[in-house]
């Protein structure tokens, strides 16, 4: 049922963006506005008013339900899931959180680690994703030089920009 609603709209590639925005929102590094804007655009562009997009619209203010539904979609579309599209959207969303200065270093570190813990192992082990597990330590441990986390964030943000 979920898959049908997406295929009717012909927008399978945009779902990775929704997943990235939903994940950042669920982990507390976004207010959900980017997710809702992307969902509204995707739903508005869709030829279908049934299936997953409609279900996502009904829970658009609930990050947990949203993420659960998007994870089901990812699992049922693993062969078509684009790590590149997901990664690009994830890094853009994290960069927005980082540059906004709305979040403390502790919030950024814990959010980044939480995102990394959520990722499937095959994605979490790839660049730039595996750096997400280290950011919290770089931010809070006196054993690491000051500014290391900032350098790592910048490298992560550039990863997909360099591949455009």
Image: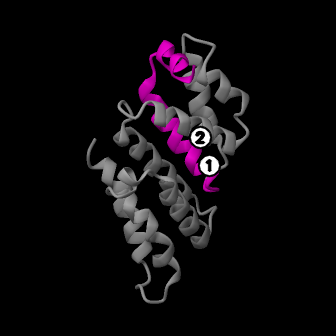
Q: Residue at x 53, y 81 (%)?
A: 140
Q: Residue at x 33, y 48 (%)?
A: 160
Report the Cα–Cα distance between label 2 and label 1: 9 Å
For label 2, the residue is: 34
Residue 134: image location, x then y, percent:
43, 71
Give the quarter of the image for residue 59: top right
Q: Is residue 93 magenta?
A: no
Q: Is residue 11 left or right of residue 29?
A: left
Give the quarter of the image for residue 86: top left
Q: Which mark is residue 86?
A: none
Judged from the image, the secondary structure of the residue bearing numbered disc 1 is: helix
Is the residue under label 1 in contact with that under label 2 (CB below 8 Å)?
Answer: yes
Give the quarter of the image for residue 150: bottom left
Which label's residue is closer to the chain start, 2 or 1? 1
Quadrant of the image containing the N terminus: top right
Tell me which segment is drawn in magenta: 1-29
Principal secondary structure, stretch drawn in magenta = helix
Q: Residue at x 49, y 85 (%)?
A: 141
154, 57: nearer the viewer: 57
Q: Residue furthest left?
A: 163
Q: Residue at x 40, y 85 (%)?
A: 145
Quadrant of the image containing the C terminus: top left
- Position of residue 19 relative to residue 161, above or below, is above
- Disc 1 crowd rating (10 Å Cα; few below 14, some 14-19, many 20+) is many
For label 1, the residue is: 25
């Amino acid at each position: 049922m979920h898959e049908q609603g997406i295929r009717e709209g012909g927008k399978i590639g945009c779902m990775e963006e929704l997943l990235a925005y939903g994940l950042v929102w669920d982990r507390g590094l976004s207010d959900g506005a980017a997710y809702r804007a992307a969902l509204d655009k995707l739903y508005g562009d869709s030829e279908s008013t049934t299936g997953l997009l409609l279900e996502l619209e009904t829970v658009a203010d609930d990050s947990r339900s949203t993420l659960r539904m998007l994870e089901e979609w990812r699992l049922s579309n693993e062969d078509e899931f684009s790590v590149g599209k997901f990664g690009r959207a994830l890094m853009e969303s994290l960069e927005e959180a980082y540059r906004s200065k709305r979040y403390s270093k502790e919030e950024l570190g814990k959010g980044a680690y939480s995102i990394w813990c959520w990722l499937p192992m095959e994605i979490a082990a790839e660049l730039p994703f595996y750096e997400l597990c280290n950011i919290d330590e770089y931010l809070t441990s006196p054993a690491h030089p000051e500014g290391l986390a900032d350098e790592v964030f910048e490298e992560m943000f550039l990863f997909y920009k360099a591949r455009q």
